[in-house]
Amino acid sequence: MVVLSVVSNLLMLTGPLFMLQVYDRVLASRSVPTLVVLTILIAGLFAFYAFLDAMRSRMSARFANVLDSKISGRLLSAGIRMRLSAGNRSNLDPVRDGDAVRQFLASPVPLTLLDLPWVPFYLGLVFLFHPWLGWLAVGGSLVVVMLMIANEVLSKHPAKETTSQQQLRQRQADDVRLNAETVVAMGMGEALQRRWSKQTDRMLSAQVTAGDRAAFFSATTKGLRFFLQSAVLALGAYLVIQGSMTAGLMIAASVVTARGLAPVEQIVGQWRAFVTARQSWARIKVVLNNPERNEREVELSLPRQTLTVRGLATAPQGSKSALVGGVSFDLSAGEAVGVLGPSGSGKSSLAKGLLDIWPHLAGEVRFDGAPLSHYRSGQIGRICGYLPQRVELFDGSVAENISRFAAEADSEQIIAAAMTAGAHELISSLPDGYNTRVGEQGDLLSAGQRQRIGLARAVFGSPFLIVLDEPNSNLDSEGEAALSAAIQKMKERGSVVIVVAHRPSALNAVDKVLFVQNGRQAAFGPKDEVLKKIVQPAQNVLPIKVPAQ
């Protein structure tokens, strides 16, 4: 790229040299053959310049794509982690920052930056034509440089504010779109539209401020360049009159001066894009500097025997105070435990801590004696299955969602998971069966259908640990019976099943109960014993109806 820039800038001297030869040789000698030869030569040189310029543009676009392919995966992973962070600011989006950098690198601006070091070279040529012209060009260049510095100082904050407001506006639009049913059902459209309009006004105000400053400096720089080119021409004409230089040198000096300052003018005109890309890259560097999970050299065997929890305390990433703590229990393959407790007691928080969704502030969770972090990332899906409270499917087919979008999913495994979850008949009744598209976040399906397909996804591949958070919240009696049967099948296959529940019907197939209250473990043991303790009127801990045995 640098070599092409050198050759390209040398070829830019073709025009001034052609003018010099025409004014000082062709017109003086009135030689038509010389004019024809020079014209043919200049046509070839400009054609070669066009080829090199196209090559530079193609190379910059491909470099941008290569960089994007190298970092986009890490940026997506960082975006996922940031969504789980308690301290995450909603206006940060690493993927959009990556897109901004890629678009900037694929634009003509980086090529202009490569041309910037050639400004002294062009000004040096003007000095060779005549010192007076050189000093005039240098003086004009210093004024342009001062404008660049002022542009940087005055445009930095508005550009940053514009980016922040744009991302906030986009996040609000995404939230409204993803919660469209709630918006329509409760008549929230007008209120949210007013909220979005206010954010739009803030964004437009920031854009106007940044745009006005950028336009002022761009117009001032352009006007100064035009004036400087004319001033060089006027001073050159005076020197020609005085006999200090030829008319050809006068024209060439004017063109070279304009060419030398052209990169500066272009950079000032595109300064907003440059500042936005620079700020995006600064945020990306923070993401890239965060260490990723290192893959273990030795691949452990998948757990098959025990889940051990000792003194576990967990909270969202970035939070310093635990939402649930002091949890300790042991489970063996084929056992199921129900997690009970009042609303807000920490049941779902415990589920996220067990699966390493949230970091451990204290204690540990071990699978056959090894923490989950000691297993390779490719093994996690074969170790853990998870059905969250809010079942979020991905835009794709039912089969793709059940298989977790595995590259080479086995049809028999997909059907086996659906049958384990009691969802095979339900899926078969859909218009295209397992090929039915579920829509964005599964919005083409009912809540009950999403929950049963989500259960099938959780049990796909018979993982060792299966965590079900409120798995019967959207199920009818038939679905609850299928859930109990599914838990029993998972136990028979040697899985450890953890069921977070409010409704007692979800406890029919569990062996033990873990009772959580105020973010602390209050009881753990066989189901009958713990249920007797927590429903004793004297303790009045949890008003719960004991399921029929």
Image (cartoon, rainbow, N blue to C red):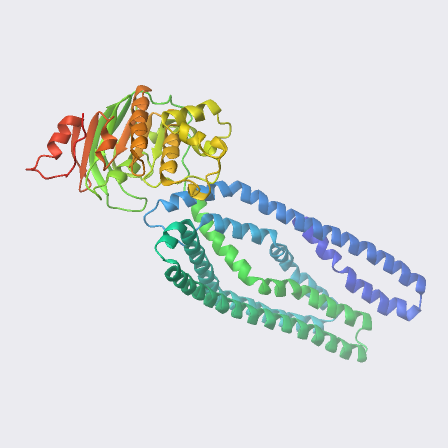
In the rendered image, residue 6, in percent from the top left (x then y), is placed at 69, 53
Q: Residue at 59% across / 69% down in the picture?
A: 218
In the rendered image, residue 410, in percent from the top left (x then y), is placed at 48, 24
In the rendered image, residue 162, in percent from the top left (x then y), is placed at 47, 62
Q: Residue at 82% across / 63% down in the picture?
A: 18
Between 201 and 284, which is closer to the camera in this rendering? 201
Vertical arrangement, residue 195 with respect to residue 478, above or below? below
Q: Residue 226 is drawn in which quadrant?
A: bottom right
Q: Residue at 48% across / 38% down in the picture?
A: 437
Number of on-image labels: 0
Q: Residue at 45% across / 43% down in the picture?
A: 440
Relative placement, left or right, of 205 versus 474 is right
Would residue 310 be seen by someone viewing this image from the given angle? Answer: no
Relative placement, left or right, of 208 versus 188 is right
Relative placement, left or right, of 257 versus 21 is left
Would residue 359 be seen by someone viewing this image from the given angle? Answer: yes
Quarter of the picture holding the C terminus: top left
In the rendered image, residue 329, in percent from the top left (x then y), is placed at 21, 28
Between 29 and 455, which is closer to the camera in this rendering? 455
